[in-house]
Image: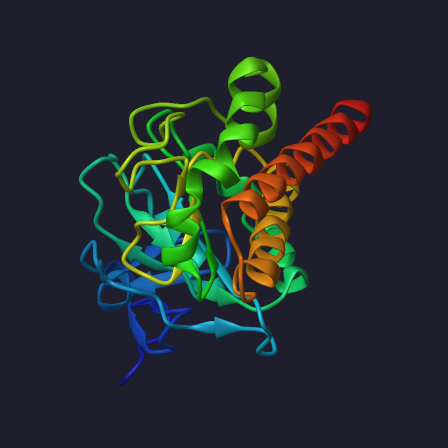
Amino acid sequence: MLKIKRFLEYKKCTYCGKEFLAFYVSKVNKIDFICQDCKHIYGYAYKNNTYKGKQSKISFSFEFETSSRTTKLYELLKYNFVACVDASISGFEWKSPIFYSKKSFHNVCRKINDLSRYVGNSCGTHLHVGTPYKDLICKYEHEFFTPILKEMKENKQETIKFWGRYFNSYCDSAIYCSRYNTFNTRSSVETLEFRLLKFINAEQYIRACDFCIDTTKYINTFIGQSGFNKEQAEKMGEIIAKKYKEVINKCVESC
């Protein structure tokens, strides 16, 4: 492409690397620009199948819901997020890549911390943690999650501080046959979804997500064993609630 010095200005799209006349690109931040093609928005059901980290037994990803459509959010493309339509929010739902390690997940959360200003009142930041036992978890969901939900309901301010918000119609405090349960076993993928989570800041979100990831690991370890039954599920539910209280107490002491 012929360039005429000081007559026409050209900018390179950070994401595809192509050069365009300046008025064909949008400014993302002080150093990044994006072209119209790279601003593609996917449908609600689109799945981000990009992976980060060395493959392990556990995987997880999150949905960074926003209440804005500002071009600044396209910085998320640098970290392999994709923008998707979601009629329940005024912005886009940015689906993260699938992580195999907490280290890479923590790193990305800290890099996008400044974008938390675009997570509005109507937004959540749901976490999906992989499990091959989704149907079994659904079978024992009352046993697993009734004790922890009781703790969460009885301590509203601690719940809001830890999870980022309180229960609503999209993350219900009751357990019933719906994908809007706070601990959702009815998603379209093989995951346990934690719907109450909201990204207030990186440290708060990392702390809560680590608990969710470790809880899913714990369930995965034992639920697939031969002879697993309701009594064992009830014991596990009490242990999950106990560990949650320990994490909350540490949070109160350190925050």
Answer whether residue 5 is visible to the viewer in this image.
yes
The quadrant where residue 125 appears: top left
- Foreground residue, 217 or 27? 217
Q: Residue 26, image x and y in percent? A: 31, 55
The quadrant where residue 196 appears: top left
Q: Residue 210, image x and y in percent? A: 64, 48
Left or right: where 238 falls relative to 193: right
Query: Which quarter of the rendering shows the C terminus?
Result: top right
Colour mode of the rendering: rainbow
| Point 29% across, 25% down: residue | 169
When the figure is inspected, residue 97 is found, relative to residue 83, above or below; the finding is below
- Residue most extreme to the bottom: 1
- Residue most extreme to the right: 253
| Point 20% across, 54% down: residue | 44
When the figure is inspected, residue 178 is found, relative to residue 221, above or below; the finding is above
Q: Residue 36, image x and y in percent? A: 22, 63
- Foreground residue, 186 or 29? 186
| Point 55% across, 60% down: residue | 220
| Point 31% across, 48% down: residue | 93
When the figure is inspected, residue 102 is found, relative to residue 70, above or below; the finding is below
- Foreground residue, 152 or 67? 152
Left or right: where 86 falls relative to 236: left
Q: Residue 250, image x and y in percent? A: 78, 30
When the figure is inspected, residue 44 is found, relative to residue 183, above or below; the finding is below
Query: Which quarter of the rendering shows the N terminus?
Result: bottom left
Answer whether residue 125 is visible to the viewer in this image.
no
